[in-house]
Amino acid sequence: MAAPEIALWYGLVAALRADAGVVALVGGRIYDEPPQGSTRPFVRFGNLNPSPVRTDCGTACLVTFSLEVHSRPIAAGRTEAMLIAAALVEALSDNEETVTLDGYTLSRLQWMPGAATGGRDDDGESYVEIRGFEAIVG
């Protein structure tokens, strides 16, 4: 059985690729590490930080993670990146039932509004919107 954070990652990728709102905006371009020259927009997993937590039933894993939206729009400016970030939040936050984990149970999946940032990418042409989430996997 994979570690809980790996099971979560696979479940999140599958859930996002199955969400009509996300797919309408980025297709299947959801990556751990985007291939060289990837078409934008795309979603990339950022930080993924697991830590053990005690629960009433024993132990679980609290996983904080971020999703990065990378966009280089022709006309929409930062709006495209913000719309995609909103679709990610809509698809995942408080929607534990849409994420299937192999060998684990997802008991909480929430967007952390304080962990949202956005702006121009280092290349000066693109936009990046980052949304932070936390999950409890048992």
Image (spheres, rainbow, N blue to C red):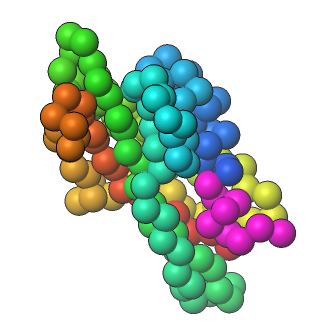
Based on the displayed image, in which of its 4 quarters is residue 124 positioned?
top left
At a point 48% along the width and 50% down the height, the residue shown is 45
At a point 73% along the width and 56% down the height, the residue shown is 101
**Left/right of residue 26 with respect to residue 125 in the rendered view:** right
Residue 74 lies within the magenta run: no
Based on the displayed image, in which of its 4 quarters is residue 64 positioned?
bottom left
At a point 65% along the width and 86% down the height, the residue shown is 59
Locate residue 72, reporting x and y percent.
29, 24
- In the image, residue 32 sits, relative to residue 22, either above or below, namely below
Q: Nearer the viewer, residue 77 or 59?
A: 77
Locate residue 125, reporting x and y percent.
19, 28
Residue 19 shows in the view: no
**Left/right of residue 61 with respect to residue 81 in the rendered view:** right
Number of numbered discs: 0
Highlighted range, magenta: 1-9
Locate residue 92, reporting x and y percent.
50, 44
- In the image, residue 40 sits, relative to residue 107, either above or below, namely above
At a point 67% along the width and 49% down the height, the residue shown is 11
Based on the displayed image, in which of its 4 quarters is residue 17 positioned?
top right
Q: Main secondary structure of the magenta part?
A: helix
Which quarter of the figure is the C terminus placed in? bottom right
Locate residue 104, reporting x and y percent.
75, 65
Residue 28 shows in the view: yes
| Residue most extreme to the front | 36
**Left/right of residue 119 with respect to residue 130 in the rendered view:** left
Which quarter of the figure is the N terminus placed in? bottom right
